[in-house]
Image (cartoon, helix red, strand yellow):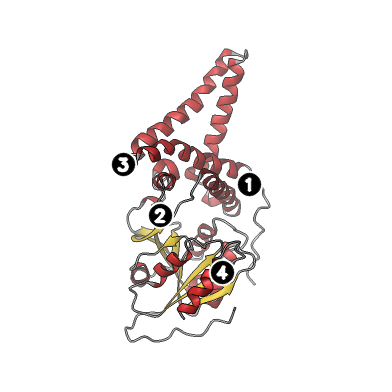
């Protein structure tokens, strides 16, 4: 399946540039057809191709991809034996034919004007990468709850790509539309970062003098995890890999990323102290229970403010979703092994 990418972009009567969309895919049988249809259903007048990097899926993803590719010559399939996201992105990039590259995920839905807005923003700003908002939208009561938490300060902090904000330079953005030259300048995605590869890539782009640009006009529908177990796993991995980013790039340490592990340590220590005080230890240790009580009050306050408009069942789930996101992220951060990510090789 893998073939060497072609040369320069083809001309098009509209004068619009050609664009390659790249999508790593693993176990996406349920969402792949919908995501591919949205990716190729763009109003951009220039040529489009979609390169799917197929990991070793355990469901019918490969079969669905083959059917889609047979029906649309704009779809190109490449293999990604490791199944990791950064490896898939690099393999898709190597096969991509065009100078403008748009990253897509197999569980997100691009709006019809996504590529045209991205191209216009790249041309207007001169940025190396432009991106927008990860617009979490749920279809079940649980997914609705997670979507609300993922678009709130208490759930994810103040990142514009979660909450929105004014257009301008940003540390990172969701997904991204890139100049191929920028990706090649920094050596593509770091395959050591199974998670957080977008943030790490954008840091290197900025570190080499490039501009990463956020615009709320780029809004991508994202489907949240469907249950607490998978949500906890997702945020545990986020925490583990965020610590790796901080080890690799110490200058990126911020209060936002230290808040979850601090909450875990404080509530655990306060609870332990309170239990000792209640069990016959020094009475003043009972004051430690104020910490978990305060955290619980924060969750309830966040639910009261952030749960407006949710159905009663979804609203009732919100404290548990907030706590799962915080604690899984914090525990992942605190237990992240130093050798989780191998050092990136120096460029020759």
Neighbour tally class for label 3: few under 14, some 14-19, many 20 plus, Cα within 10 Å: few
Marks 1,4: beta carbons within 8 A: no
In the image, residue 301 sits, relative to residue 217, either above or below, namely above
Please report whichever mark, 2 or 4, sits nearer to the chain's N-terminal start: 4
Q: Position of residue 198 (x, y in %)?
A: 51, 60
Q: What is the spatial separation of the Cα atoms under label 3 and label 1, in whole angstroms?
A: 37 Å
In the image, residue 170 sits, relative to residue 301, either above or below, namely below
Please report whichever mark, 3 or 4, sits nearer to the chain's N-terminal start: 4
The disc label shown at residue 72, or none: none
Please report whichever mark, 1 or 4, sits nearer to the chain's N-terminal start: 4
Identify residue for label 4.
62
Q: Secondary structure at mark 3?
A: loop
Q: Position of residue 167 (x, y in %)?
A: 33, 58
Please report whichever mark, 2 or 1, sits nearer to the chain's N-terminal start: 2
Identify residue for label 2.
161
Indicate left or right for 63 with 152 as reference: right
Identify residue for label 1.
336
């Amino acid at each position: 399946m893998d073939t060497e990418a072609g040369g320069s972009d083809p001309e098009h009567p509209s004068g619009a540039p050609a664009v390659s969309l790249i999508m790593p895919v693993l176990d996406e049988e349920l969402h792949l057809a919908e995501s591919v249809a949205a990716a190729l259903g763009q109003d951009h007048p220039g040529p489009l191709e979609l390169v799917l990097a197929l990991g070793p899926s355990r469901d019918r993803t490969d079969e669905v991809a083959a059917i889609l590719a047979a029906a649309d010559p704009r779809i190109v399939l490449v293999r990604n034996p490791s199944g990791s996201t950064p490896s898939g992105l690099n393999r898709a990039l190597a096969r991509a034919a065009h100078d403008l590259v748009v990253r897509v995920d197999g569980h997100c839905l691009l709006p019809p004007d996504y590529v045209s807005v991205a191209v216009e923003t790249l041309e207007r700003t001169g940025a190396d990468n432009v991106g927008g908002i990860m617009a979490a939208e749920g279809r079940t009561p649980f997914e609705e709850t997670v979507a609300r938490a993922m678009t709130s300060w208490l759930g994810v902090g103040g990142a514009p790509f979660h909450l929105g904000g004014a257009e301008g330079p940003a540390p990172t953005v969701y997904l991204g539309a890139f100049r191929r030259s920028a990706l090649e300048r920094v050596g593509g995605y770091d395959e050591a970062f199974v998670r957080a590869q977008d943030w790490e890539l954008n840091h290197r782009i900025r570190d080499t003098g490039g501009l990463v640009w956020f615009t709320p006009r780029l809004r991508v529908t994202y489907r949240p995890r469907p249950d607490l177990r998978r949500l906890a796993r997702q945020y545990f991995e986020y925490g583990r890999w965020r610590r790796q980013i901080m080890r690799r790039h110490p200058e990126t340490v911020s209060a936002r990323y230290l808040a979850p592990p601090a909450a875990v340590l404080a509530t655990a220590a306060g609870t332990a102290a309170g239990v000792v005080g209640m069990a016959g230890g020094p009475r003043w240790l009972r004051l430690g229970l104020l910490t978990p009580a305060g955290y619980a009050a924060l969750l309830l306050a966040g639910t009261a403010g952030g749960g407006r408009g949710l159905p009663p069942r979804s609203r009732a789930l919100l404290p548990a979703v907030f706590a799962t996101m915080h604690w899984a992220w914090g525990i992942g951060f605190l237990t992240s092994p130093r050798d989780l990510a191998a050092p990136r090789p120096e460029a020759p």
